[in-house]
């Protein structure tokens, strides 16, 4: 076997302090006590740094009083509101583990996640209580539901504030103890809990200093990316608090609300995703707002094309940069330098500091040459501990030498800049959110009229990709009936949006669906149009 061809970062390695997450984030917060740490872009409710750190301590004491111990999992089902980081940080500060979930998920999806993670408590908002109560009945380990507000049958968050402000002394080993348990489908299959240690997240925040150095103490940053998602959780929330900035939260994406916040709060730098870049580049309503203070846009979670990046830059006179990462890597592994003139739009940039990469031919297991396609493998301090209670899934994507197999196909040029060009894994990315084909296929096969099913991603100009189902029927059924059947059972972003009826689903001799053949057929059809 040939020697590994390891591509390293152009930046010096970073020093990673041996600190737990919450002390690291708020290491300098005492200097910023009177400054606003977080404000709701809709209601104006806010916390100063002094009030935020006090609330975290009090909720941590309250969680302990309610029996939450080190290693327990607390589920958090909430939109972006000022109390989200209060709960998240309070859980992490006592050595417990916060598992976040998309608030638009169904009761079945929430219940499945919290049954898998063995959550003992759920925290949510009144509007989501009924759904979370139904989910709790599916997850037998859940003892209590806490509501941010008032709700009969739940513990109000305010009750957790009544147990003093002394955070119990808990020893946290940053390298081993898990702080966050977001869920990801990985390279295939159903969603799995990603064990991110305190050190994983602290390391990634150190690695992305070059992204966050364009804002600092007192600056305002846009908090529209969902905080349950690793991008919003670490890059936006973590980055803002570490640097003493103020995060302006929005509970959901509404273009005019986003534009209003950008204008009112004179935001200089915003972390966003390609669908928002598309709106900023193309939508006529943008012209009604003064965005002259906006200087930097950083895009992630899904590929950003060169033409769209350039169109947005030219319209708004801003610097557009992008990066790459995964839930399993805390998340950032690659990014464009924010301030250097040399940039390749359409690329995700070079490796982050202290990050190594290899590109592997999936068929031979050998490293590929510069300029050739290969599966991207990553090694660095931000790579997860593993999947929760899934040793086989962990072993399938992690080597003994610490390499994480991303399932994405990339090309690296002679400067060490990477382009993501394809996917080995079967994940669908709808507006940056993960949709697992296996999850949709299992639901489709539950319909009595469907004999066999396969789901693949197909390109979409607005969403990036949408799920398309190929179905073998045993009884007559329309495409509209198929789509309605799925829509009633999943979150909106997971809906099947195209359907094709076929005589057979291509499979390997072992019975594995050959989705790649369906993808290639779909591409050929699109190319011929």
Image (cartoon, helix red, strand yellow):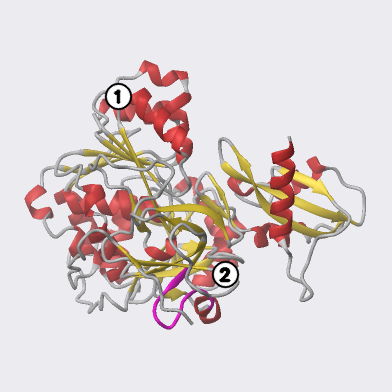
24 over 175 or under it: above or below? above
Name the residue: 49% across, 82% down: 1
| Percent of width and height locating residue 450 | 84, 57
Q: Is residue 397 magenta?
A: yes
Question: What is the magenta segment's predominant secondary structure?
Answer: loop
Name the residue: 44% across, 39% down: 252
Task: Name the residue tied to disc 1.
Answer: 291
278 over 134 or under it: above or below? above
Which residue is nearer to you in this view: 158 or 524?
524
Task: Name the residue tied to disc 2.
Answer: 362
- Horizontally, residue 396 falls left or right of residue 445, namely left
Q: Quadrant of the C terminus?
A: top right
| Percent of width and height locating residue 461 | 58, 36
Q: Nearer the viewer, mark 2 or mark 1?
A: 2
Which residue is nearer to you in this view: 198 or 63?
198
Task: Quadrant for residue 285, please give it.
Answer: top left
The answer, for residue 287, to whether it is visible in the render is yes
Q: Is residue 107 magenta?
A: no
Task: Quadrant for residue 314, please give it.
Answer: top left
In magenta, the rendered stretch is 396-405
60 over 466 or under it: above or below? below
- Horizontally, residue 69 falls left or right of residue 253, namely left
Name the residue: 46% across, 42% down: 304
Which residue is nearer to you in this view: 526 or 81?
526
């Amino acid at each position: 076997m040939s020697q590994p061809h390891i591509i390293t970062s152009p930046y010096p390695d970073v020093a990673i302090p041996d600190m737990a997450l919450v002390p690291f984030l708020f290491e300098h917060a005492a200097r910023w006590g009177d400054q606003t740490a977080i404000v709701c872009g809709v209601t104006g409710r806010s916390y100063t740094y002094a009030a935020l750190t006090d609330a975290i301590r009090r909720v941590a004491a309250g969680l302990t009083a309610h029996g939450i111990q080190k290693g327990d999992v607390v589920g958090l089902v909430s939109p972006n509101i000022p109390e989200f980081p209060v709960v998240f940080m309070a859980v992490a500060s006592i050595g417990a583990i916060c598992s976040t979930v998309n608030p638009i998920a169904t009761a079945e999806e929430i219940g499945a996640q919290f049954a898998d993670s063995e959550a003992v408590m759920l925290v949510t908002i009144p509007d989501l209580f009924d759904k979370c109560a139904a989910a709790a009945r599916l997850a037998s380990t859940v003892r209590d539901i806490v509501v941010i507000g008032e709700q009969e049958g739940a513990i109000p968050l305010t009750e957790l504030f009544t147990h003093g402000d002394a955070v119990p002394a808990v020893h946290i080993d940053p390298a081993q103890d898990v702080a966050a348990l977001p869920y990801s489908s990985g390279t295939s299959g159903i969603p799995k809990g990603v064990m991110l240690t305190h050190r994983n997240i602290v390391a990634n925040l150190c690695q992305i200093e070059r992204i966050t150095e364009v804002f600092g103490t007192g600056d305002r940053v846009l908090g529209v990316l969902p905080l349950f998602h690793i991008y919003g959780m670490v890059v936006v929330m973590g980055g803002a608090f570490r640097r003493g900035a103020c995060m302006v939260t929005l509970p959901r994406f509404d273009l005019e609300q986003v534009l209003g916040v950008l204008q009112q709060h004179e935001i200089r730098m915003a972390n966003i995703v390609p669908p928002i870049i598309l709106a900023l580049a193309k939508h006529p309503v943008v012209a009604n707002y003064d965005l002259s203070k906006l200087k930097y846009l950083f895009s992630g979670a899904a590929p950003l094309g060169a033409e769209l990046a350039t169109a947005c830059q030219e319209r708004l006179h801003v610097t557009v940069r992008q990066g790459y990462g995964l839930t399993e890597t805390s998340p950032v592994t690659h990014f464009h330098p924010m301030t250097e003139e040399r940039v390749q739009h359409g690329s995700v940039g070079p490796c982050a500091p202290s990050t190594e990469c290899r590109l592997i031919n999936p068929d031979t297991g050998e490293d590929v040459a510069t300029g050739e396609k290969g599966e991207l493998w990553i090694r660095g301090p931000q790579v997860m501990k593993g999947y929760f209670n899934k040793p086989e899934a962990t072993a399938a994507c992690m080597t003994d030498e610490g390499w994480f197999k991303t399932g994405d196909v990339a090309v690296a040029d002679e400067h060490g800049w990477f382009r993501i060009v394809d996917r080995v894994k079967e994940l669908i990315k709808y507006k940056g959110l993960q949709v697992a084909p296996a999850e949709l296929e299992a639901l489709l096969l539950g319909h009595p009229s469907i004999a066999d099913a396969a789901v693949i991603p197909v390109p979409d100009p607005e969403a990036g990709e949408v799920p398309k189902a190929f179905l073998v029927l045993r009884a007559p059924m329309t495409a509209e009936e198929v789509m309605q059947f799925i829509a009633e059972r999943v979150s909106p972003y997971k809906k099947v949006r195209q359907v094709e009826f076929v005589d057979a689903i291509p499979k390997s001799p072992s019975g594995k669906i050959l989705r790649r053949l369906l993808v290639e057929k779909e591409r050929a059809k699109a190319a011929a149009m």
